[in-house]
Image (cartoon, rainbow, N blue to C red):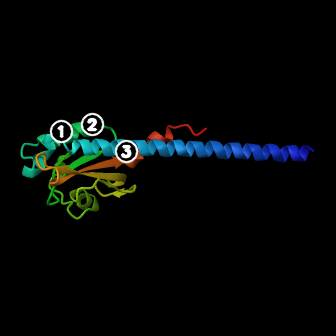
Amino acid sequence: MALLAFHTARSTLRAEIDHQLLAAARAELATVERFVGDAETALSTWSNLHIIQDVLNDDPDGEASRELARLAHQASSFTELLAVNAAGKVVAATRGDYIGLELGDSIAHRQALGGRGYRSPVEHSALIDQDAMTLAAPIRANQARDQVLGTLVGIIDWHEVSATLDELTVL
C-alpha cells in the first residue's frame, strides 16, 4: 500500500513539474515574441520618418544618423540602426564606423528592398561580433508608397535579450 502511494505521489509530482516547466517555457516564448514583434513595429514606423528619407541624398548633414542614434538609445531593443540606400551603401547609422559599408548583398537588404520586412534567426553578426537578430524594413518614398528608397536595418544584441530572460523566474 505504501509503495502504491509513493508511486502515485511521484507521478503526480512529475506531472505538476512538467506542467510548471511547460507553462514557464510558454511564458518565455510569449515574452520573446512580444519583444521581437514590438521591435519590428518600431523599425517599420521609424522607416517612415521623413528624416530617414535622407537615404536619397546620402544624409549629407548627418541628421538621419543623429536621429538613428537617438532612436537606438530610446528603444533599448536595438543595439545598432543603419539606413541603407537602394544601392546597398550604409548612408546613416548609429555609429560613424558603419557609414560607407556595403550591405547590398545581404539578404536583409535585398528582402526589404523588395518591399517586405526581414527577420533573421539568432546568428553571429559580423557587424557587432556577437549573436544577434537582424531586422530590416523598407524605406518608402513619402509621395509614392510603392517606391522603396532603401532599407532600415536594426540589430538586436541577443546577449541582452538572454540577460532579460534570465531574470524571469521559472517556478
Quadrant containing the C terminus is top right
Counting residues from the start of the chain, the first of labels 3 and 1 encountered is 3
What amino acid type should be assigned to the residue bearing mark 2? Answer: His
Residue 36, position as x, y percentages in the image: 38, 45
Looking at the image, residue 49 lies above or below residue 130: above
Q: Where is mark 1, residue-wise?
A: 67
Residue 78 visible? The answer is no
Residue 105 visible? The answer is yes
Counting residues from the start of the chain, the first of labels 2 and 1 encountered is 1
Q: Could you tell me how far apart the alpha carbons at marks 2 and 3 are, in whole angstroms?
A: 18 Å
Structural crowding at the residue carrying mark 2, measured as other residues with C-alpha within 10 Å and reported as few (<14), some (14–19) or many (≥20): some
Residue 60, position as x, y percentages in the image: 6, 46
User: Residue placed at 46% from the left, 41% from the top?
Assistant: 31
Q: Where is mark 3, residue-wise?
A: 37
What amino acid type should be assigned to the residue bearing mark 3? Answer: Gly
Q: Where is mark 2, residue-wise?
A: 73
Q: Are marks 2 and 3 in contact (CB under 8 Å)?
A: no
Q: Could you tell me how far apart the alpha carbons at marks 2 and 1 are, in whole angstroms?
A: 10 Å
